[in-house]
Image (cartoon, rainbow, N blue to C red):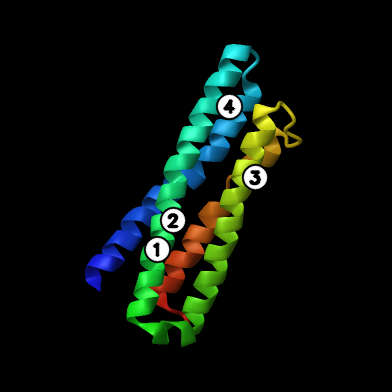
């Protein structure tokens, strides 16, 4: 079980690296004024999205494996709250793809400021998830 947990954490770090950096790319993309820069950011955003999707999928896969090894975890409130936060991060992840598609079509309705605030969402999720997994407050 310890190896499964280690892999879960390794891929969680990979996933979060993407969740933290993807909105930053969007901010830089909005600042690009030339067509070459626009195309370059589309490629960078797509590649990062692929890598973080792999990290996210493996995070979820190893997480569900942990639950399969210890199904009683599902009865613990801290796990239930953690899973709800993870579900929110999955939605956040897929919303990043929508923003990417909008930017690629030059139809992004979000400002740089909005993206800067939006960029803080995964940090809040990470802090809460780590507290739940380590402290297990309830």
One can see residue 106 in this view: yes
Instruction: Look at discs 4 and 1 and give the one toward the viewer.
Output: 1
Between the residue at mark 4 and the residue at mark 3, the CA separation in whole angstroms equals 15 Å
| Labels 3 and 1: the sequence-earlier one | 1
| Labels 4 and 1: the sequence-earlier one | 4
Q: Which one is in front, 111 or 46?
A: 46
Residue 23 position in % (x across, y down): 57, 39
Residue 14 position in % (x across, y down): 38, 48
Determine whether the residue tagged by mark 3 lies in a helix, strand or loop: helix
Quick check: marks 3 and 1 in contact, CB under 8 Å?
A: no
One can see residue 112 in this view: no
Q: Is residue 82 left or right of residue 11?
A: right
| Labels 3 and 2: the sequence-earlier one | 2
> What residue did someone put label 2 on?
57
Between the residue at mark 2 and the residue at mark 4, the CA separation in whole angstroms equals 27 Å
Determine whether the residue tagged by mark 4 lies in a helix, strand or loop: helix
Query: Which residue is rendered at x = 51% and y = 71% of the image?
Result: 83
Instruction: Look at discs 4 and 3 and give the one toward the viewer.
Output: 4
Determine whether the residue tagged by mark 2 lies in a helix, strand or loop: helix
Between the residue at mark 3 and the residue at mark 2, the CA separation in whole angstroms equals 25 Å
> What residue did someone put label 4 on?
28
């Amino acid at each position: 079980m310890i190896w499964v947990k280690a892999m879960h954490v390794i891929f969680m770090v990979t996933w979060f690296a993407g969740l933290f950096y993807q909105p930053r790319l969007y901010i830089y993309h909005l600042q690009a004024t030339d067509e070459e820069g626009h195309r370059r950011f589309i490629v960078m955003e797509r590649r990062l999205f692929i890598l973080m999707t792999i990290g996210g999928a493996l995070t979820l896969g190893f997480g569900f494996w942990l639950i399969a090894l210890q199904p009683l975890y599902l009865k613990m409130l801290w796990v239930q709250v953690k899973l709800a936060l993870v579900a929110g991060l999955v939605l956040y992840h897929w919303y990043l793809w929508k923003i990417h598609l909008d930017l690629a079509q030059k139809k992004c309705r979000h400002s740089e400021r909005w993206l800067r605030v939006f960029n803080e969402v995964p940090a809040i999720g990470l802090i809460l998830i780590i507290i739940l997994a380590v402290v297990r407050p309830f």
